[in-house]
Amino acid sequence: MIIAGQQYLIGLKKESTRGTAVDPDSGYWIPWTTVDVKPNQKNKELEQAMGRITSLKDIKVLGWNTSISFEMAFDRKLIKELLEGLYGAISTSSDDPESGVNTHTFTVANTNVEYPSYTITLYNAQQEQQFVLGTIKSLTIPLKTDDIPMVKVEFLANKYNNVSGKTASYQTSNSIFSALDANFYIADTYSNIGSASAINIQSAEITFERTLVGVQYLGNDTYGNIVTTDFKASCKIVLPYSANTYNTLYTGHTQRAGRIKLVDSDETIGSSINPTAQFDFPLGYIQERAEKASIKEIVGEEFTFQPIDDTTNDISRAELITDV
């Protein structure tokens, strides 16, 4: 039976025991916009001489894993689940800044290569499958003035297991961050980023990438573990070319601190708090800077703010103020 894309359902749940399947909670089925599921077969060709001109005699399957990616709106409830898996460490201050509102701080887990893993559940008329040990490989957040920001996340997971009896349950209401909520800040030091003025930019794209290593053991056709061996971040900025500030920083190879902050002023949680998502880059450089000009257009400028590791404050950290 042919099915429509909207009938392809995906759910997400953090595993309490790595590699042990768990079902998605109510409200943790993803209202996605695109999904891509790719089973990866690890194989070896067997070539032998047997008196014929051809040599390929067989292809032996040695293992399986799965690449799963999806895009979703920048939802304040679901982004918490993803940021914990991305950064690896979370600290929560409950009822802060007021009752019913929580502040979550996400930091890079520098001493543990076993980052949080997820069970990813796929459900549709053709099949019900679960993929354990789902580990975030990359996460991208584009912010453009003419579009709704979609968070794109890519997982590496194990081979599927067939399941049955799953029921999807979505949030009845949600709060979605938009590009109208976003501002970019830059300061000479991280300690001064809080007092920096917002910079007028046209777009930003935040990208996080992790190097993953799958560990497969003899006698098994899929991974026994997936570990993280590197963490990188970057932020691409586009703005009108109205001053030589960033060219000076670029050519002078000057260190700076950066921040992207989103405040959803259309939504109130608690009695008076706006949901907030903040991404900090405590130490970095302006890289890949360029000017672009076209007839009948304003002259533009673009650069990448490239964070480097700050042993005190990490390469990046994030803060989420929400009611979950």
Image (cartoon, helix red, strand yellow):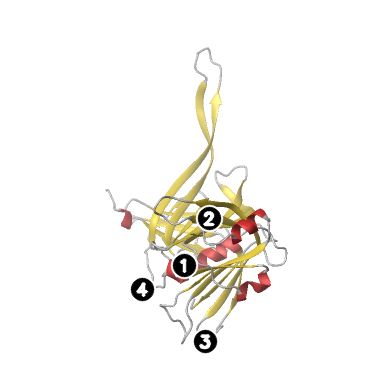
Q: Position of residue 165 (x, y in %)?
A: 37, 60
Q: Nearer the viewer, mark 2 or mark 1?
A: 2
Q: Nearer the viewer, mark 2 or mark 3?
A: 2
Residue at position x 43%, y 81% in the image: 268
Residue at the spot of label 3: 99
Extreme-left residue of the structure? 1
What label sits on residue 172 in the rendered view? 4
Q: Is residue 151 left or right of residue 173?
A: right
Q: Is residue 79 above or below residue 60?
A: below
Q: Are marks 2 and 3 in contact (CB under 8 Å)?
A: no
Marks 1/4: CA–CA distance: 13 Å
Marks 2/3: CA–CA distance: 42 Å
Q: Are marks 4 and 2 in contact (CB under 8 Å)?
A: no
Circle 2: element type = strand
Amino acid bearing label 1: Leu
Residue at position x 59%, y 76% in the image: 92
Res 26 → quadrant: bottom left
